[in-house]
Amino acid sequence: MMGSLASVYERFGDTHRAFNCCDTTFRVQAAGVRADAAVTAAQETAESLEAQLNAFDAASAVSQLNGDGEVANEHVARIVRRGLEYNDRTEGVFDIHQGRVEHDLKTFLRGDSETPPTEFDAGTVRISGSHVTTDVELGLNGLAKGYIVDRASEALGGVGRRGFVSGGGDMSPPTGPVAIESPYGDDTPLKLLDTDWYVATSGGYRRSRNGTDHIYDPTTESLGARHESVTVVARRDCMEADALATTLAALPLAEARELAAEWERLEALIVHDGVFNTTEGFETHVLDT
């Protein structure tokens, strides 16, 4: 049935496109009525949001916020609200107050500096409508890519059309089976997912230098992912999957398993020392083979 439905959409158009966004490759696919126009709209949405949310771009809204201490931008405000929610729900493990740490860490991973950050920050953030004020640099990378996937996916929508957006391991609900990339450098996927939930994968294997990667835990002031790989499927949206994959990657195994099990409408696969640790319902999102 699914195959025949897909072929009906494809008769009206089937467009695939890849482009660079958020320091990774975004892949967008749409099938159905005006598929090509929808993919173009999704790409334009992603690129516009990247320009507003890229902390390394001096002209971005995030750079304005971190430089001036305030900005009026609806997208930044939405992300900051969600970041504060996750800061509270993870007891500070997911912390958007670490903009300086994120900037210095990314600079180190790029090879533009010789030492990673060693100190973490604290501060106050306030939101009123689309206006955000802060007395500390904010780091929104743990949410921005998932947010961009969500908004680009929305741009694909329409009567007689369906589509899919993937950005470096963050995905809108797939329109078919998708593979979880192995962190061990081989071509054998960890699992094949068959799900209508949002997907995100995190781990130190993606970006690392001299044993340091992009994951950190400000509650213990430590750098580095604690597991080889974390994959999250979330019902809410890709932003939630993105945030929780990052959070679980930073936590010790027992704490990561406990948080994942308690979080509603979320399932997770945590690969630790070669062992697959899954929440109770994760296998319901895995393709039967």
Image (spheres, rainbow, N blue to C red):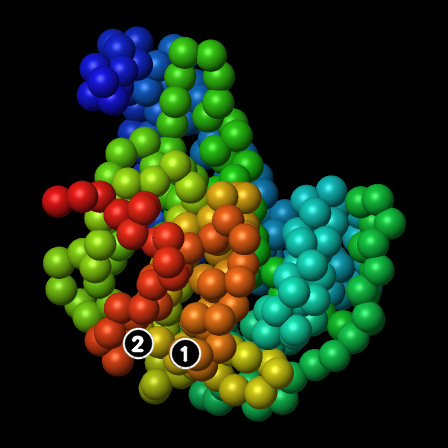
Q: Residue at x 40, y 17 (%)?
A: 161
Residues 218 and 256: in front is 256
Tell me if I can see residue 178 in this picture: no
Picture quadrant of residue 82: bottom right
Placement of 52 over or under 99, stated as above or below? above
Placement of 181 over or under 139, stated as above or below? above
Q: What residue would you read off at disc 2?
A: 272
Secondary structure of residue under mark 2: strand
Residue found farthest to the right: 128
Picture quadrant of residue 98: bottom right
* Disc on res. 253: 1
The amino acid sitting under disc 1 is Leu
Give yes or no for contact between labels 1 and 2 (Cβ–Cβ under 8 Å).
Answer: yes
Question: Closer to the N terminus: mark 1 or mark 2?
Answer: 1
Q: Position of residue 248 (x, y in %)?
A: 46, 69
Placement of 68 over or under 30, stated as above or below? below
